[in-house]
Image (tube, helix red, strand yellow):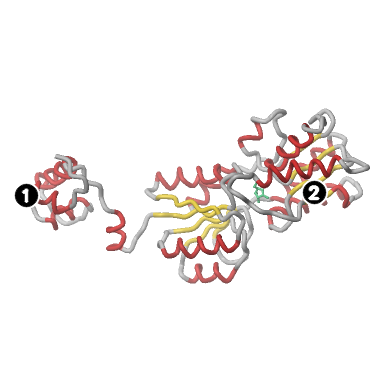
Amino acid sequence: MNLKNATIYDIAKYAKTSTATVSRVLSNSDYPVSDELKQRVLDAAKKLNYTPNLVGRQLKTKETSDIAVIIPNISNPFYPSIVLGVEDVAREKGYNVLLCDSYRNPQLENAYLQSMVEKQVKGIIISSISQNNKTFMQLVEKDLNIVAFDQDVTFPCNKITFDFEDGGFLAVEHLIMLGHKKIALIGAPINRPSRKSIYDGYLKALKKYNIKFNKEYVLLNELEKEFHNEIYEYKNGIELAKRFLQLDDRPTAIFAINDLTAIGVIQGLKSHGVRVPEDISVVGFDNIFISEMVQPALTTVDQPQYEMGKLAANL
Ligand code: RIB
């Protein structure tokens, strides 16, 4: 027999016992039930294809086993790699993962935060776009477990940090060691802690090797808008590559603020007959999995995304 939506009443009837006993067996309670009766209940549940009603259980116990991950946009492979790390740990420990894309929109991020609180998630792992401490402080006061990654935050919570400044420094130092003195920086607006630090690393490397800073070589888009059907950073790379090619005194190397931008830059240069690395060197940041699939494979700074996701989930 296979009931479409078998309930504990059906199981009790089938196993010839009470619903209280069925409930005790199915919830693994400590209440003593004989082995024979326990087996009868389990057999009945199997026979009737019983699926536990988690929503009902949650309403009773006021407990969920969900954790939320809020990221700017799943179209940048940097974030899914982090989510995989979160998911692998969560699954192992019996948690479900709810994924939210803020599309780099502070209002949407805020709406997701509120909705996750209403869903009574056990914790929130977030790359925050808003820096809105008021909302976060309210969550912290509610004892919600928050783990921030990617963007530094100032409210008290656990954090997965990365030395973006040193990463930027190493990328530019690498280009300098290859003999480059005219190095462009290409990216989205420097409006987030991670990007600010990468930019500082760029400046630091130039300074260390006595290379004069040229503001013409810093090509940033003023607009940043994510759509579901457009990969903003990739498109931005293509667009800024065109601007780069119009420079009178063109640099010999480009440091892109992240890999998606770098891949867009390479694409933009290629479409104008400029070869990478023969004519221009390009270095990215992140080491997303696509960086080894493109031609030529991209030189980049590794952020251990999967491991960072695992760490965040463990916290
Ligand atoms: O591509 C994503 C990475 O680049 C993240 O570290 C983010 O902060 C960015 O600037």
Circle 2 sits in a helix, a strand or a loop, which is it?
A: helix
In the rendered image of this protein, does residue 273 appear above or below residue 230? Answer: above
Residue sitting at x 42%, y 59%: 121
Residue indicated by mark 2: 202
| Farthest front residue in view | 229
* Amino acid bearing label 2: Tyr
Vertical order, 207 against 105 (above or below): above
Q: Earlier in the sequence, mark 1 or mark 2?
A: 1
Query: What x and y, as percent, mark residue 63?
Result: 34, 60
User: Does label 1 point to a residue whose CB lies under 8 Å from ligand 1?
Assistant: no
Q: Position of residue 255 (x, y in %)?
A: 78, 42
- Residue 2 is left or right of residue 201, and the answer is left
The count of marks equals 2
Picture quadrant of residue 240: top right
- Residues under labels 1 and 2: Cα distance? 74 Å
Residue placed most toward the observer, 38 or 215 = 215
Per the rendering, the mark at residue 16 is: 1
Position of residue 28 measured from the top left corner of the image (x, y, whole percent): 22, 52
Image position, residue 147 (x, y; %): 53, 57
**Which mark's residue is nearer the viewer, 1 or 2?**
1
Identity of the residue furthest to the left in this view: 16
Question: Which disc number belongs to residue 107?
Answer: none
Question: Measuring 27% from the left and 63% from the top, which residue is drawn there?
Answer: 60
Q: Residues within 10 Å of mark 1 (few under 14, many from 20)?
A: some
Q: Amino acid at mark 1?
A: Lys
Question: Residues at badges 1 and 2 in contact (C-beta under 8 Å)?
Answer: no
